[in-house]
Amino acid sequence: MVPAVNPPTTSHHVAVIGAGAAGLVAARELRREGHSVVVFEHGNQIGGVWAYTPNVELDPLSIDPTRPVIHSSLYSSLQTIIPRECMGFTDFPFSTRLENGSRDPRRHPGHSEVLAYLRDFAREFKIEEMIPFETEVVRVEQAGENPKKWRVKSRNFGDISDEIYDAVVVCNGHYTEPRHALIPGIDTWPGKQIHSHNYRVPEQVKDQIETVREDGSVVFKNGKTVYADTIMHCTGYKYYFPFLDTKGEVTVEDNRVGPLYKHVFPPALSPGLSFIGLPWQVIPFPMFELQSKWVAAVLTGRVSLPSLEEMMEDTKMFYSMLEASCIPKRYTHLMAELDSQFVYDNWLADQCDYPRIEKWREQMFYKVFKRIQSQSSTYKDDWDDDHLIAEAYEYFVKFPSNYPSSLIEREYTS
Ligand code: FAD
């Protein structure tokens, strides 16, 4: 059912935490709805996870809670898993740009092309003027004197700021804080261990391997013999909000952030607190965009949320359904069923009276998913959906600000 859409009412002063893809699009949507926005960014540039760094943390397993944290988990040779045409925001195509050969034209480009795209987006929508960089949010809580307001404490090097906002939108990403599997005996295992968060290049695990034996053991240059030289822990990441104090209204239990209505609003604290970007195994950017549109419209009052009781009931029913299907809590935000993300996206779009996800985008995602399963080593170079690429570029022509001018000329002159 499409909810009642009310006329615009209120604009708010909103804090967004993080200037990755989620924070950038949240800032744009909030400002479009008339809110005033500050985007707090811990790092010195936009892009979040896409701001690749060769640096890794000193603790290769990232266990020490006091360690200096490196945000990005990308490795040097990473190419996008999702084809660029369906990966971008819905109205700012992630199309191929040539620009003096400085851009990566591949369909599954490397990470620097994604960062360049996000920079184009930030420039086009003048997002950087809303961002204090190198400013870490260290505490978020309801303002004691007025629980409808939010106190945000942030740190810029030695300077601490303490400000009051009407709403806080959390966009801090969830691929930084490693999860660790409990493996008996791991503490005394003699080899090297590293979490994938700290993997960048193959050289990190090169030149240690002396001889291998028929019994499966490996003799190292340092004389040790083990049955493997390195354990790479690819055990995923944790949702982690060290700055957030909700007095127990929002918890993270076995990687379920809850209770959250539709993965975004904690019913008891809505609409003042919201989360963008929690679902995974999805096409993230368009979903962030739709979640952001919803949050922005709910904050103005243009779109209404159900009552607290209805939101709690909906959330409980969702959790009961997961339990009945034997789905562990840690998969609460996983949208693994192929069409579940699009059902969700379209629900969000309906809330905001925005067009639903384009059919070509859905089909392209299904296609790449199938290619990954059937041709895992070649799926980035060998595809059979040129007709969907053509459809995507027909759609992109509506958005000339990020559509290659050479193609526009070709469209208009042919
Ligand atoms: P992030 O990009 O992590 O940004 C969060 C930002 O918040 C960061 O800039 C951080 O510095 C800031 N921040 C955090 N805490 C604070 C604080 N307390 N105060 C101030 N600032 C703070 N997605 C795709 O679409 N296609 C792909 O091919 C793809 N491949 C991926 C491969 C890997 C290895 C990984 C890890 C992810 C991949 N993703 C991919 C998913 C990717 O995470 C999303 O595309 C997206 O970039 C996430 O954006 P985000 O804004 O939610 O989080």
Image (spheres, grey):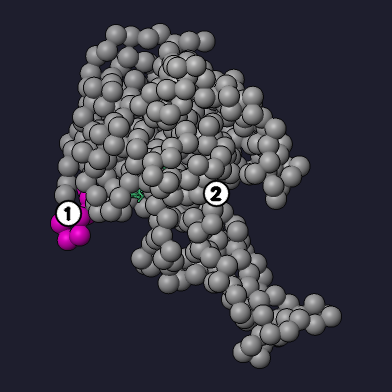
Query: Is label 2 within 8 A of ligand 1 (CB to nearest ligand atom)?
Result: yes
Image location of residue 136, percent across then percent down: 27, 52
Is residue 202 rendered to the left or right of residue 371? Answer: left
Residue 389: quadrant of the picture: top right
Residue 79: numbered disc = 2
Is residue 257 rendered to the left or right of residue 325? Answer: left
Residue 318: quadrant of the picture: top right
| Residue 410 visible (yes or no) | yes
Image location of residue 401, percent across then percent down: 35, 26
Between disc 2 and disc 1, the foreground one is 2
Is residue 154 rendered to the left or right of residue 384? Answer: left
Q: Amino acid at mark 1?
A: Ile
**What's drawn in magenta, residue-wise?**
153-159
10 Å neighbourhood of mark 2: few (<14), some, or many (≥20)?
some
Q: Amino acid at mark 2?
A: Gln
Q: Which residue is mark 1?
A: 160
10 Å neighbourhood of mark 1: few (<14), some, or many (≥20)?
some
